Image (spheres, rainbow, N blue to C red):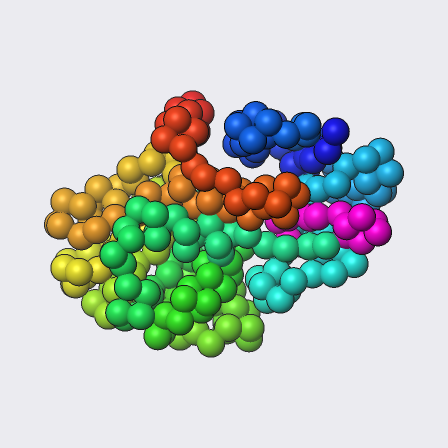
Amino acid sequence: MKKIAVIGHPVSHSLSPFIHNAWIEEYRLNAKYDAVDIAPENLKTQIRSMIADGYVGFNVTIPHKIAVMDICDTIDESAKNIGAVNLIAVSRQGKIQGFNTDGFGFIANIKTQKPSFDFSSGAALIIGAGGATRAIIDGLMQQNIPEIYVTNRTRSKVADIAKTYNINIVDWEQRHRAVKNAALLVNATSLGMVGQPPLEIDLSRLSANALVCDIVYKPLMTDLLLAAAAQGNGIVTGLGMLLHQARPSFKKWFGVLPDISDKLRMEIEQKAAQ
Ligand code: NAP
């Protein structure tokens, strides 16, 4: 039996076991996927002992995505640029290989919800400069997006991203104006999430053809998406990013890129709303 786990601290909230175990059942595989809580000080020893115990793959969540890079024998180009690993595959020779699938998840979610969206049609404006933003930029660059603008409350974090990626920095106070040039507007902050303040952004200058995407998925329809939809803009909800980022993980471990059935999507929507 193949043993896989998501590791984090805390980790009990993770939806990954439900998603992967649904696919394991669908493809009738002899495997199991657990959630294992690992305290930061035990990260390296516990991963090594899990591998010795037969684990061949991991998803990595907060707070281990950066620290886990230290124990990877190889890290792929995107994960290096993003500066975080969320997928580990252990090779037959025991090599620990690190990847990042968040950029794939972001792009695949847009392609699924808005197949007609043309990434080369104009610039993207990303609000936020946390871990998710780096993965989104990496994904967008692979789609040959012509220009990327990033704005964040803490400017130094965008300046840091600009050391790795060719992006334009927008002052936080200028974000309302910057909306004007965006073909794609993305909220990659935690603003708008249940329990967090709303995202304050004036959409009145937004082009009628622009697509608005929120990676916050609790609630699924954030105030940003409601406002964009109310003025006729296309929208993309965030939960699909979570579902799609899981697919390349499954492929690395089991050799098959799974589909997201309507049943799985609806079950995850219900779980995420709880
Ligand atoms: P993170 O690294 O903690 O970054 C948080 C971001 O939110 C930073 O840019 C931060 O700005 C900004 N922010 C927080 N509070 C703010 C406030 N009061 N005013 C202005 N900006 C504020 O988090 P992350 O990992 O990038 O994730 C961001 C959000 O995306 C979270 O809600 C997360 O749940 C969601 N997410 C969803 C998916 C998905 O699959 N759909 C995947 C990853 C993340 P500062 O730098 O100024 O603090």
Q: Quadrant of the image for the N terminus?
A: top right
The residue drawn where x is 75% and y is 41% is 56
The residue drawn where x is 35% and y is 53% is 111
How far from the left and from the top, in percent, is residue 136?
45, 58
Region rendered in magenta: 85-96
Quarter of the image holding residue 98? bottom right
* Position above or below: 229 against 66: above
In the rendered structure, the answer to whether residue 65 lies left or right of residue 184 reads right
* Position above or below: 163 against 125: below
In the rendered image, is residue 41 in sight? Answer: no
How far from the left and from the top, in percent, is residue 122?
27, 70
Number of numbered callouts drawn: 0
* Position above or below: 54 against 200: above
Q: Which one is in front, 239 or 24? A: 24
The residue drawn where x is 43% and y is 37% is 260
In the image, residue 89 lies in the stretch drawn in magenta = yes
Q: Quadrant of the image for the C terminus?
A: top left
* Position above or below: 16 against 104: above
